[in-house]
Image (spheres, helix red, strand yellow):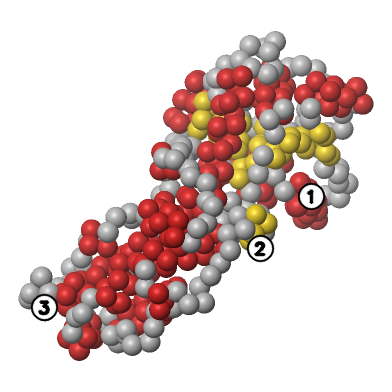
Amino acid sequence: MKILHYIPSLSEAMSPVTSAILRIVSSVSGQTESYIVTSTHLTREMEQRLAVEYSLRIMYLPELSVKGPMKAYRTIREIKKCLELLQPDIVHIHGSWNHMLYVMERTARKNGYVTCVSTYGGMSPEVLNTDFLKTKLLPLIFYQAPMVRRSTSLLAINEKEWHDIRNLSLKKRVEILPDSPKDDAHDGSLTLAVLAAYQKAIDSSYRRFITTDEEMLVERCLITATKNKEDLTNNTVEPVKSDKGTLSYRRVFFYAYDEDVLDKFLEGARQRSYNIPLYENVGEMPRYVDRKAKKRGSLSQLPLPLFKTHLKDTTSLEYKAVTSIMRAHKEGMKRLTLRHKMELYDIFRNDDFNEDVVAKELSRLRLKRFTRKIQNLLHDMYNMSVGYDII
C-alpha cells in the first residue's frame, strides 16, 4: 500500500498537532510506502530525522510566485504531477482551515484517488465558535465543509472529535483511532486501526478502479455456469493480466458479491479451472454503506409497477416473462444486477412461452424498445444465439 500524506506546514517545533500528525504518519510508515508532501521546506536535520526515525520520504510542492487565477491553475497542475508520479492508494490530508488542504483533496478526488482527512480537532465547537463570523464562516462554506463532506472518509484522533464531526451532520464516514502513548510513535493498536481505516476506504471505492477485464472475468464465469455450450463460443478470457497490470481478485470478489452472483462466479471459475484465491465472508468485510448500491435478490423480488398486465393466468410462463420485463423496466437498465440479467437470459433461453402472446402484451405496455435493449445486452454478454428474440 502506498500512502501520500499531505501536510501543508510541518513545524519543527513539536506542537501537540505536529506530534499527533507524526504519530499517525509514523504508525504505518513501516507497513506501507509512505511519502510526506508539503509546501514548507524543512531543515536537513528534520529531513534526516523523518527519514531515519520514521522511514518517511519527503517531497515538496514548488512555491509559486504568481498570484491570482494562474497560481490556482499551476498549483493544481503541480499536484497532478505529484499524484501521477507517486500513484498512491490513499491520499491522507492532515489539518484543517487551510485552502491548500481543500485544493489537494479536491484534485486527488477528481482524479480518482481515495482521500482520507484528519482535522485534529479543527471541527470542534471550541474552534468553530472562535471568531466564527469574522474568520470561520466563509472558509467553512467555501472549502472546509466541502472537504470534510466529500472526502472518502475521516479519521478522528479521539472519541470527542468523532462526536464533534457527527454532530455537525457533515460526514458519517468517520473512524475513531485509538489513543497511543505520546512517547510511543509505533503503537501496535494505532497501526492496525489506521491500516484498517485505509483498507476500508479503498474497498468502499473499488468501483472507481475496477477494470474491464475484471468485470469480464466475472461475466465469463457466469456464462460457463449456465452450461449452455452453444453460447460459450468466442467467450474466453485469461485471468492473468489486465490492461492496467495484474488483476485484483479482491475487486473481482467485491464486484461479484455486489452483483449477487458470487456463488455462480465461483462455480464457473471452478469449471474453467481458474486458480482463484478464496476470500471468505466477503460480504462481512468492513465497507461503508453505498447509497447507490443495487438491490440484491431475485428479479421476482423487485416491485411491480402500478400498471397491470392483462394476462390472467399468474402461473403461466407468459405471465412470468412479461412481469419480469415489467420489473426490470421499473428498476432501470443501469440498476439491474448480473443476477437479474442471468434470470432474464434464462427466461429468454429456456422458458417455452408463446412468443406471440408475450410480444403482443409487451407492445400494449409500450415495453418493446426496452425489451430490445435487454436482448441486445444479453446478445453481447452471453453471445445468445439468434432465434430467441421475442420482439
Taking depth in this image into account, of 50 and 117 the one nearest to the observer is 50
Mark 2: few/some/many CA within 10 Å (<14, 14-19, 20+): few
Q: Secondary structure at mark 1?
A: helix
- Does residue 98 show up? no
Q: Judge whether 82 appears above or below 227 on screen.
A: above
Most distant residue in the right direction? 44
Dot placed on the residue nearer the N-terminal end, 2 or 1:
1
Write down the residue under mark 3. 311
Residue at 79%, 50% in the rendered image? 85
The image quadrant that residue 351 belongs to is bottom left
Question: Does 317 sit left or right of 5 as displayed?
Answer: left
Write down the residue under mark 2. 243
Taking depth in this image into account, of 297 and 345 the one nearest to the observer is 345
Q: Is the C-beta separation of discs 2 and 1 under 8 Å?
A: no
In the rendered structure, which amino acid carries the disc numbered 3?
Leu
Residue at 23%, 58% in the rendered image? 301
The C terminus: image quadrant: bottom left
State the image coordinates of residue 158 (x, y, percent, origin top left): 54, 20
Write down the residue under mark 1. 85
Q: Secondary structure at mark 3?
A: loop
* Front position among marks 2 and 1: 2
